[in-house]
Amino acid sequence: MNALLHINWRSIQGLKKFSMDSVSESTTKSSINEFGSSSNSEPSQPCGNQPIPSSDTVEYVFPVVGEEFKPKLERIFKSLDEGIEFYNRYAKEAGFDANMSTVKRYRGGDISTRYMICSRSGFSEVVNQDSTKEIQGQRKRKTSSKKKGCPALVVLKRCAPISNDFFVSKFFEQHNHNLVSKQNHHLLRANRQLDIVEQSLIQTFGSYNIGATRAFTLLSSIKGGYDVRGGTVTDYKNFRRDLNVSVGKNDAQMLISRMEDRVKYVPNFFFDHKIENGYLTGVFWADEASRSNYKEFGDIVSFDATYSTNKYSMVFVPFTGIDNHRRCVTLGAALLSEETAESFVWLLQTFLKAFGTQPKMIVIDQDAAMKIAVSTVLTESRHRLCMWHINKKLPIKTPHQVFSHPEFKKTFHKVVWNSVIYPDDFDASWISMIQQFGLEAEKWFCDMFDMRSLWIPSYLRDFPLSALMRTTSRSECENYVFSKFLHPEANFQDFMVLFENTMEKQRYNQRSYDHQCLNTSPKYKTPLAIEKFAADVYTRTMFFLVQKEIFNSIYSCFHLSVSVEDDGEVYLVKDKKKSTWIDVIDKMIDEDDDDPFAVYRKPLVDLCPNTNFKVVFNETEDSFTCSCMNFIQEGFLCRHIFYVFNIKEIEIIPSKYILRRWRKDIIAPEVLLQKFSNTGEEGKLVKDAFAIFISIVNKLGREENGLKNFISNLEDMHEVLNERGKSKSSCSKESRMASLRGASIPESIEVQNPEGIRNKGTG
């Protein structure tokens, strides 16, 4: 228990004039009795003159600690750091925080005397403020003061000018406030200092968009509770803030330097940027995996502007393709300060510089600047509009009464997405739909019909892999992925870490799908040898699509006739599954005059008039074609051709009908394994240490004795490290932050951070 002692304040009024230099050696050696009624000795103040409270009595508290912790008078330390560390350890054991105070030096600059005081020494300055006058728009911050004029201190003096040894010159152990209880020692400032592990993990969690609060919760759980030694959630937030502040005005320069280093040292890494008036206005980059993906899957590419991904409001523009698993892959990425035609022209020209060839099809939204840039630069590519963006506008552009009709959306999508019909059939279906739902006067529907060749699948039925546009149009998939990782307050350093973690996850998924294809077998649905052949050559996702066609070739198709024409053998194949899309709509209830939607309940023209398909086998060219054009649009054979294969007893798919982009294991695994380090050497070592620790625990498993021995060894090592004392780092705070980030602070700034950016995403 703490010993309390009451003294008469009037008996120590001289304390107000007492300074540290006037304290004698005999005073520092005073016992408890010297501060009682039997002694006239007075405690000294460490910081010169201080105000004296108007209280009549003061309660002094003496820490109860082991004698081995107390800095006894005239004790000698081999260095000043050793003495400071000793007093800090005493303070933590006693239940208070110690502060550095006055320092005295010799003429040569060496320290002669160092004062250390209680953190509650001194008094807070009282500021008179009219509480009725509040600054508009500013919230008052509620703060509290710890200062109470505590007299506790230690004075360390150098033994001799030429010596490194220091000794305890003065030591006052009494405090005029309660000390922190043992149960709350973890809340002492000294015990809340974030160690290298916590700092590294906060940085690592941040790279996965895990904020300081969640990081605190996770680490507290790992360490065994909130009251285990370590920082509070506020300390975690402050450290995360300091990480961001450490970048500051160097952000753009650090980004450029990092990217230029990768161009030098990372194989096949491409990077380019644009600067205007000293400010960064554009960045484009693509690593080896992105360039490899473009080489294999760059036939259909979409690019789209995404907002709220960084603190500068620069527009994030990812280029997206579809891989051999029919999944979205990022082919490159950019940040732009403007959404102008000139800006997009620079981006597309840089894109071509990186990849060398133009995509067969480029999919964009209806942005006018994008259209101009695409027409200017990608002259060999077919331009298409993103159907996802068009569908997003449907609720806004459609009158509420029409959009709320239970059949409107179903009808609209059946008209728009039907790639089997011919363009003329689409035109008739669209006009019929417009008339039935009374949309003739709606400008948006008129405009979309005028530009139908840029987005309607039936107008693309003869274009290779045009159906991939529907997959690529799932921009919401890619946007959703990035939205989970990126956030609007990220600086460039955080943005790149988050982006690269997203890429790491994407490529991990690619490797996982490749592994599944190479090391597992699917279930077969037919006894046909051609199905097993398909399983050997196609990725699993593609095989399931081909398997469906093979299955339906047996159970859904039969031929109506076979004839010989100039082109070769012609099979007229009936497809029972390809019934008209509008059958359900045709089965409507009788209209009632009181039904407000009766005007819409009229049959549309048949959306899919042909369920008979013409398969032609050209023996001279050894080729098969089908009027459904599935191979052209999707890149794999249809059920109608598989039906003819079965008649002709063809058991393998001819190589000309197996596109390379759908085969297994196209991208080399080592390319997908490429990672970029976003932490310094310390961060890597911490991760390695954790990996080894987890590996050891896993190997010991449920061996209770083994785990006990392991814990015992760790405790012995921990004790040795405690005896050795806390290691001191000579690096500055800025260097420490740079080390955690894995990026150094530049000596000079040639590129300024973007300023004053306004775009669609800024509101």
Image: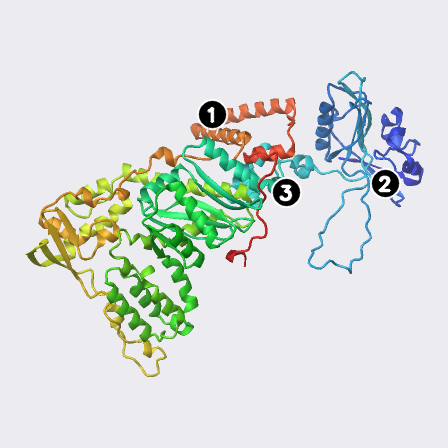
- Secondary structure found at label 2: strand
In-front residue for pair 698/272: 272
Left or right: where 646 falls relative to 92: left
- Pick the quarter of the image with the C terminus: bottom right
- Secondary structure found at label 3: helix
In-front residue for pair 640/365: 365
Marks 1 and 3, the one that precedes in the sequence: 3
Q: Quadrant of residue 432?
A: bottom left
In-front residue for pair 663/279: 279
- Pick the quarter of the image with the N terminus: top right
The outermost residue toward the bottom is 593
Circle 2 sits on which residue? 58
Q: Amino acid at mark 3?
A: Asn
Q: Is residue 320 above or below residue 536?
A: below
Label 3 Cα crowd, 10 Å radius (few <14 / some 14-19 / many 20+): few
Horizontal and vertical percent position of residue 173: 80, 31
Give the number of the disc on residue 62: none
Q: Amino acid at mark 2?
A: Val
Q: Is residue 695 above or below residue 754?
A: above
| Residue at 14% across, 55% down | 615
Asked if one can make out residue 120 in the rendered structure from this viewpoint, the answer is yes
Label 2 Cα crowd, 10 Å radius (few <14 / some 14-19 / many 20+): some
Q: Are marks 3 and 2 in contact (CB under 8 Å)?
A: no
Q: Nearer the viewer, mark 1 or mark 3?
A: 3
Marks 3 and 2, the one that precedes in the sequence: 2
Horizontal and vertical percent position of residue 186: 65, 37
Circle 1 sits on which residue? 706
Circle 3 sits on which residue? 238
Q: Amino acid at mark 1?
A: Gly
